Image (cartoon, rainbow, N blue to C red):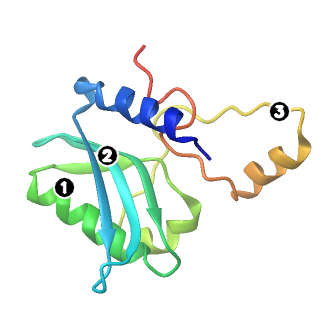
Amino acid sequence: MYDDRSLRWLLAHADQMKSSGDFKKVLVRDSSRELVGWFMYYLKPGGTSVVFQFVARKNAANDIIDCLFDHARRHRSAAITGRLYPRYMHELSEKRCYFHRNGSWALVHSNNNELLNIIHRGDAFLTGLEGESCFLF
């Protein structure tokens, strides 16, 4: 959970990473205009776009995925990559997404066993906003 100030700072920082592409933040609404999710990603026309964060309400993952893929296609992205969120594996598999491990694993340390168990079970929501992926090195 983020407070207003820290979230604004993180998003502003992510927006500065121009070498990663054009940082897009897209809200997705259903036919009644109710918010059902969003995605943030670095759009690279002609290249590989990188998903930074992907959020979907229960039973709305397919809508968010379709919107993301359509947005990237319309802006001429050649491919999309990003961190796999286990809770969306079924929907991504049905869309014929290709899964591979390319890059680093996550390293987590805590003296709080309850927190570690949440992460190990896959119940934590870890996105591009957590860790070093949104920092310029």
Q: Is residue 74 left or right of residue 125?
A: left
Q: Is residue 121 left or right of residue 6?
A: right
Above/below status of 79 relative to 71: above
Q: Quadrant of the C terminus?
A: top left
Question: What percent of the width, then of the height, locates residue 44?
Answer: 18, 40
Assign a secondary structure to mark 1: helix
Q: Residues within 10 Å of mark 3 (few under 14, many from 20)?
A: few
Assign a secondary structure to mark 3: loop
Disc 2 or 3, which lies upstream in sequence? 2
Q: Which residue is found at the position 32% from the left and 74% from the top?
A: 29
Question: What percent of the width, then of the height, locates residue 10?
Answer: 45, 32
Above/below status of 9 relative to 90: above
**Circle 3/circle 1 CB separation < 8 Å:** no
**Circle 2/circle 1 CB separation < 8 Å:** yes
The residue singled out by tag 2 in the image is: 41
Which residue is situated farthest in the front direction here?
4
Q: Is residue 117 left or right of residue 46?
A: right
Q: Amino acid at mark 1?
A: Ala
State which quadrant residue 20 falls in: top left
Mark carried by residue 110: 3
Question: What percent of the width, then of the height, locates residue 3?
Answer: 57, 41
**Circle 2/circle 3 CB separation < 8 Å:** no
Q: Which residue is found at the position 14% from the left and 59% from the top?
A: 73
Q: Amino acid at mark 2?
A: Tyr
Q: Is residue 59 left or right of residue 97?
A: right
Q: Amino acid at mark 3?
A: Ser
Q: Which residue is found at the position 61% from the left and 53% from the top?
A: 125
The residue singled out by tag 1 in the image is: 72
Q: Which residue is found at the position 50% from the left and 53% from the top?
A: 84
Q: Nearer the viewer, residue 49 or 99?
A: 49
Disc 3 or 1, which lies upstream in sequence? 1
